[in-house]
Image (spheres, rainbow, N blue to C red):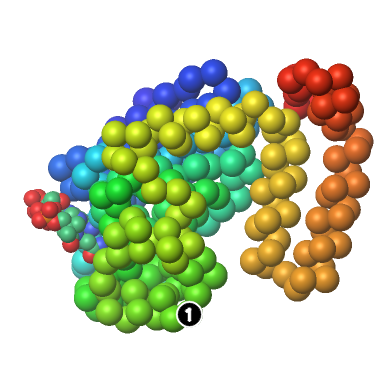
Amino acid sequence: TDFQTIVVTRTGRTATITLNRPQALNALNSEMMIEVLAAAEELDRDPRIGAIVLTGSDRAFAAGADIKEMAQQTFAQAYGGDLFGAWERLARVRTPVIGAVAGYALGGGCELAMLCDLLIAADNAKFGQPEITLGVIPGMGGSQRLTRAIGKAKAMDLVLTGRQIGADEAERSGLVSRVVPLEDLLSTAREIAERIASMSLPIAMLAKDAVNAAFETTLAEGIRLERRSFHAAFATDDQKEGMAAFIEKRPAEFTGS
Ligand code: HXC
């Protein structure tokens, strides 16, 4: 497919979606939203793709929703068009998505990063929810996902002051899983993607779904869902292969069946 605001590349069983509006620091306009969602859903339908990397440029993952595009919206237009509601489709992608963040991840950019399953930050990454400085509030899930990711104290601090945090504070707060030098960001994210893609895709989907359930349900229900999913894993060839490979002291060859 031909995209204007993103670049999609495939390498083996992984794919990379690169946000590409450098003149606007990858500000998320509606064209980019449509393209990111179309690309992610197309890759999600492809069983050959076992993991997706979502990244931006060295200077900006994304500096937020496109302020110039939304500045004149009325309530009726924002509500009637469900402004930014479509981004939730990214949360329904079942293939693991690794966010690789360098530079600014502000507002909608930070929220887009939090829609990924796992976040790697370059040492120059800056996260923030500056919406309050524009007279609005987070609108792509930030008030919910940030609070679940880093807790009320830090989330209130960021959402009410609009201040930015660097990569180290983001890691200390639990927003990102690893910080790496900028020059290693993409190679690290791709290594993680390749490692995940070398596993059984349906099992990776079960694992992702189980972790995500922790944010949606009670402990008892979550444990039940986990145990049922664990039991279901025994219905796959990949479980037989994974355990046989361990016993035979050889690498497992998963087929996704
Ligand atoms: C539209 C943007 C933009 C944005 C940057 N640009 N961010 N355009 N929407 N969110 C554009 C600038 O207008 C400029 O274009 C070009 O990108 C380069 O930006 P500069 O400001 O010149 O760069 P710099 O001085 O390095 O400052 C970088 C920055 C700053 C600190 C990231 O651009 C900034 O503060 N951006 C806005 C960040 C923000 O508030 N994000 C939240 C958006 S609200 P021109 O053509 O002028 O040179 C949001 C809401 C989410 O995301 C959902 C709830 C409503």
Percent position of residue 87, x then y: 47, 54
| Left or right: 107 in relation to 225 | left
Out of 171 and 131, give the one closest to the viewer: 171
7 shown above or below 173 = above
Tell me if residue 38 can be seen.
no
Tell me if residue 252 can be seen.
yes
| Quadrant into which the C terminus falls | top right
Taking the spot 41% from the left edge, 76% from the top edge, the residue there is 154
Percent position of residue 177, x then y: 49, 52
Looking at the rendering, the quadrant in which ligand 1 lies is bottom left
Under 8 Å from ligand 1: the CB of mark 1? no
| Left or right: 67 in relation to 11 | left
Taking the spot 27% from the left edge, 79% from the top edge, the residue there is 161
Classify residue 255 by image quadrant: top right
Mark 1, residues whose alpha carbon is within 10 Å: few (<14), some, or many (≥20)?
Answer: some
Name the amino acid, label 1: Lys
Classify residue 203 by image quadrant: top right
Out of 35 and 12, give the one closest to the viewer: 12
Percent position of residue 52, x then y: 51, 35
Taking the spot 74% from the left edge, 20% from the top edge, the residue there is 251
Classify residue 195 by image quadrant: top right
Out of 88 and 252, give the one closest to the viewer: 252
Taking the spot 59% from the left edge, 41% from the top edge, the residue there is 96
Residue at the far left in the pictured view: 23
Q: Which residue is mark 1?
A: 152
**Number of disc labels:** 1
Percent position of residue 68, x then y: 19, 59
Out of 168 and 32, give the one closest to the viewer: 168
43 shown above or below 12 = below
| Left or right: 54 in relation to 102 | right
| Quadrant into which the N terminus falls | top left
Q: Secondary structure at mark 1?
A: helix
